[in-house]
Image (tube, rainbow, N blue to C red):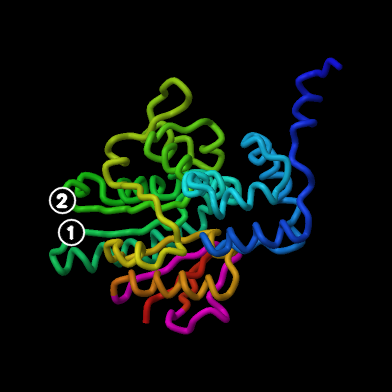
Amino acid sequence: MNTSPVTSFLLRKASAISDEEFIQLRDFIYAKCGIWIDEKRKYLIQNRFEGRVAKLGMKTFTEYLKFLQYDANRDKELPFVFELITTNETSFFRDQKQLDAFTDHILMPVLAQQRAKNRFELSIWSAGCSSGEEPYTLAMILAEKLGPELRKWRISIQGCDISLPMLAKAKSGVYSDYAFKTTPEAMRRKYFTPVEGGFKISPAVSSMVSFQHLNLNDAAAMKRLPKSQVVFCRNVIIYFDTAMRKKVVSAFYDNLQPGGYLILGHSETLHGITMAFAPKFFPGAVAYLKS
């Protein structure tokens, strides 16, 4: 019987994931990276993983689970797992009101304090940086605010993410039009150069930013990161359960220097997680001060 390419693909699809298979895969993912997937999102696992299961020549999710648990190459599969479960929706200058509050009420006072101490250095950690738009945005803000004075400063913006493909894109510094959907056109013209495949970030900006593969469920790895004055972790902890949120936020607290700030996404809060931070309310944003 002759089949079309579409029909052939459908025939190769893995069988539907059962409740038991979903629970086993959900628990495996949680143990590895702390991302919690509710039963109501079983369809998400089915949709995102069935192609991967078929590509590996497997017919059922049970085969895939055995591969993840026992195969000699199981560790090489983890980057594909992490890529399939993470959401990488981001853009430059996303949530401008929050960035304005950060700039006016946190960044500028911190820069003034550093000048007063004659310590021209600043360290920022962008946790869950995806393809790099957030840390590069922070670098552009610093370039704008410091101007020629930037040469005197030692700026370190550390972008970390669990997704190796997203980090590779971040390191390349090349972005399509979609990444600029929330970007002032003047900023794109000033800090990007047209290249094949999109626009490349300016070396003056990229020199302030470095990227590192990091699993937020790896407490030991987070302890090795340099201390920060500001930690950005926007729209990440919403994917964790309470226990994992407490673990990650505790790591942020330990990483922050005294008087440092933690900045979360608008839909995220530390309520019920910790009382170690003092919430500070600014126009359009809330930030958390290390007490």
Query: Label 1: how many residues lie within 10 Å, few (<14), some (14-19) or many (20+)?
Result: some
On screen, residue 257 above or below 65: below
Residue 273 magenta-highlighted: yes
Q: Secondary structure at mark 2?
A: helix
Q: Which residue is mark 2?
A: 152
User: Is residue 266 something that shows in the picture?
Assistant: no
Query: x and y percent of residue 232 in the render?
Result: 43, 60
| Looking at the image, residue 213 lies above or below residue 225 | above
Query: Which quarter of the picture shows residue 204?
Result: top left
User: Residue 68's spot in the image, x, y percent?
Assistant: 57, 51
| Disc sitting over residue 120 in the figure | 1
Does residue 172 appear in this view?
yes
Q: Looking at this view, name the residue that lies furthest to the right.
A: 1
Q: Which residues are magenta?
A: 258-278
Quarter of the image with the N terminus is: top right
- Closer to the camera in the image, 50 or 278: 50
Mark 2: which amino acid?
Lys
Residue nearer the viewer, 267 or 24: 24
Q: Is residue 68 left or right of residue 219?
A: right
**Could you tell me if the residues under marks 2 and 1 are in contact, i.e. CB atoms within 8 Å?**
yes
* Disc assigned to residue 57: none
Quarter the C terminus occupies? bottom left
Query: Distance from label 2 to label 1 (Cα)?
Result: 7 Å
**Front residue (pair 138, 143):** 138
- Identify the amino acid type marked 1: Phe
Residue 29 is left or right of residue 251, and the answer is right
Q: Is residue 110 left or right of residue 52?
A: left
Q: Position of residue 119 (x, y in %)?
A: 15, 63
How many numbered discs sit on the rendered protein? 2
